[in-house]
């Protein structure tokens, strides 16, 4: 009987794992010894970083979407369906409608979702650019904006840790371009005692904020929003009035994780930081935003983890032990405005050292937005 | 009180440069019942400084803070 590998999720992590594994064990798949299946709730693959540009009317939804089947190696079977539960006893993934898909090895790569409902008043009073719908709604609000107080609040946890800074710098420049900056008071808040969790990024951002006249408020954890009074209240006792509130909502793991009883309270799956196996289950690997690891929830994280998971699965399917280890590597490009960018790289052992922002790095980020399709398809 | 003797819920944020120890604590604390005791393990100095400062501002209790072999262990109890 064929060994069954199921990859649950067709985002960055799930797609890279599936394609790399398909290539590594193509012979075994052709011989009927291995079957590789991806289950994804959406028939489309979405490149989420474009949401940031959509909020400024610089990208459209269609540019960020491709049919999932077009990105997958032909050795991967795609099931477009929503998984409702993982049955670890039977080793089945249970789909909506009751169909069961058996696995010998399962990769959980269902990602994370913004959960604005966790903050009272946020859904009624705030905007966000972490979903397509949210980004388009914010775009329309920005185009109608004529000046006033803009406040950015950051929920914990959230994916793409650099997006709050990027959005703020891009907004500053965008407002200047529209002649609205003088009529706008822009406030950037952050949950901890500095402007970004990466210390060198925080150090770099501080003078830039001052130079651009952006007000900052650290130790601000959004607790509730009063849409009538147009105020946002932090857990530390600070209240900020706003005319336009932009939030990075706190994130949650997916319902399927919670419903399967395999996550913690937030829906994150306990994962070994080096082997990327689910704690206590030798048959399950966890990739990308889905893990409970204390590292950035980012596409690059999902990609580097996927490399390790695909290598270990290929090894085990071929009789090896699958002993490659993940070292915590993350790389992030950071937009510092509409025309310059920088990047940081770090892992469990080595702290980040940002590079001087440059126009070249901005063009590399824009180029990556286009090249992404090749990397997820496993070409680059 | 039962909560006084409870085992701390350990948050292993060693090697976490981003999001770091304090954000990991906030992530867990938000969803835990009042009274829960946490112990954050962190290798980053910023967290060792920030966690006590935030705990006080946000109205929680700093129970203890120790450091050995480059690892800070900071206990915090959710109070509200
Ligand atoms: C505005 C924005 C900007 C960003 N910018 C960057 C950036 O510049 N750099 C960077 O590295 N990262 C960035 N990110 C973060 C990055 O997009 C995510 O961290 C990354 O997509 C995580 O990959 P993943 O595979 O874990 O999850 P995802 O890519 O989110 O994929 C999850 C998959 O699981 C599927 N799924 C979920 N539930 C089910 C279910 N029940 N059944 C079946 N399928 C299911 C979904 O359909 C999806 O295919 C950004 C994100 C946003 C929102």
Image (tube, helix red, strand yellow):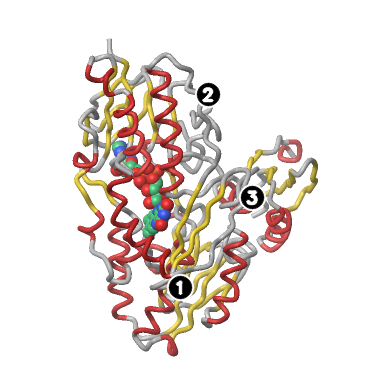
Between A271 and A224, the one lying in front of the other is A271
Residue lying at 33% horizontally and 45% vertically, measured from the top left: A375
Q: What element does badge 2 sit on? A: loop
Dividing the picture into quarters, in which one does residue A258 lie? top left
Residue lying at 59% horizontally and 65% vertically, measured from the top left: A202
Alpha carbon distance from label 3 to label 1: 26 Å
Quadrant, the C terminus of chain A:
top left
Alpha carbon distance from label 2 to label 3: 24 Å
- Give the mark toward the camera: 1 or 2: 1
Asked if marks 3 and 1 touch (Cβ < 8 Å), the reply is no
Which chain is indicated by disc 1? A
Crowding around mark 3 (Cα neighbors within 10 Å: few <14, some 14 to 19, many 20+) is many
Same-chain check, marks 3 and 1: no
Same-chain check, marks 1 and 2: yes
Residue A191 as seen in the image, left or right of residue A46? right
According to the picture, the residue beneath numbered tag 3 turns out to be B21
> Residue A108 at what x, y percent from top left?
39, 33
Dividing the picture into quarters, in which one does residue A150 lie? bottom left
According to the picture, the residue beneath numbered tag 2 turns out to be A280
According to the picture, the residue beneath numbered tag 1 turns out to be A169
Crowding around mark 2 (Cα neighbors within 10 Å: few <14, some 14 to 19, many 20+) is few
Which chain is indicated by disc 3? B
Between A234 and A146, the one lying in front of the other is A146
Alpha carbon distance from label 1 to label 2: 43 Å
């Amino acid at each position: 009987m064929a060994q069954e590998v199921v990859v649950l999720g067709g985002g960055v992590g799930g797609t890279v794992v599936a394609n790399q594994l398909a290539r590594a064990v193509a012979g075994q798949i052709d011989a009927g010894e291995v079957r590789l299946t991806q289950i994804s709730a959406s028939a489309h693959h979405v490149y989420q970083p474009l949401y940031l540009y959509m909020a400024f009317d610089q990208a459209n939804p269609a540019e960020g979407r491709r049919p999932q089947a077009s990105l997958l190696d032909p050795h991967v079977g795609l099931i477009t369906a929503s998984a409702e539960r993982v049955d670890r006893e039977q080793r089945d993934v249970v789909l909506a409608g009751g169909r069961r898909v058996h696995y010998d090895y399962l990769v959980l790569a269902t990602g994370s979702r913004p959960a604005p409902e966790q903050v009272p008043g946020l859904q009624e009073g705030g905007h966000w650019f972490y979903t397509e719908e949210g980004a388009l709604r914010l775009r329309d609000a920005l185009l109608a904006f004529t000046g006033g107080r803009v406040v950015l609040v950051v929920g914990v946890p959230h994916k793409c840790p650099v997006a709050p800074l990027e959005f703020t710098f891009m907004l500053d420049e965008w407002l200047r371009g529209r002649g609205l900056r003088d009529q706008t008071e822009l406030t950037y808040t952050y949950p901890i005692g500095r402007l970004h969790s990466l210390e060198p990024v925080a150090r770099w951002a501080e003078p830039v904020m001052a130079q651009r006249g952006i007000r900052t408020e650290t130790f601000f954890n959004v607790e509730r929003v009063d849409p009538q009074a147009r105020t946002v209240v932090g857990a530390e006792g600070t209240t900020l009035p706003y005319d336009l509130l932009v939030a990075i909502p706190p994130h949650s793991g997916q319902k399927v994780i919670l419903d399967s009883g395999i996550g913690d309270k937030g829906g994150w799956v306990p994962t070994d930081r080096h082997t990327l196996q689910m704690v206590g289950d030798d048959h399950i690997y966890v990739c990308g935003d889905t893990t409970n690891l204390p590292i950035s929830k980012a596409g690059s994280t999902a990609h580097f983890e996927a490399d390790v998971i695909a290598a270990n699965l290929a090894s085990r399917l071929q009789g090896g032990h699958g002993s490659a280890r993940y070292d915590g590597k993350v790389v992030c490009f950071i937009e510092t405005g509409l025309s310059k960018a920088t990047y940081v790289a770090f892992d469990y052992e080595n702290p980040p050292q940002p590079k001087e922002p440059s126009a070249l790095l901005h063009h590399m980020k824009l180029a990556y937005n286009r090249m992404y399709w090749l990397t997820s398809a496993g070409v680059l | 009180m039962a909560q006084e003797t409870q085992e701390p819920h350990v948050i292993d944020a060693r090697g976490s440069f981003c999001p770091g120890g304090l954000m990991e604590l906030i992530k867990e604390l938000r969803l835990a019942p009042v009274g829960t005791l946490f112990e954050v393990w962190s290798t980053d100095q910023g967290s060792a400084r920030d966690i006590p400062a935030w705990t006080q501002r946000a109205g929680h209790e700093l129970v203890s803070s120790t450091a050995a072999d480059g690892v800070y262990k900071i206990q915090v109890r959710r109070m509200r």
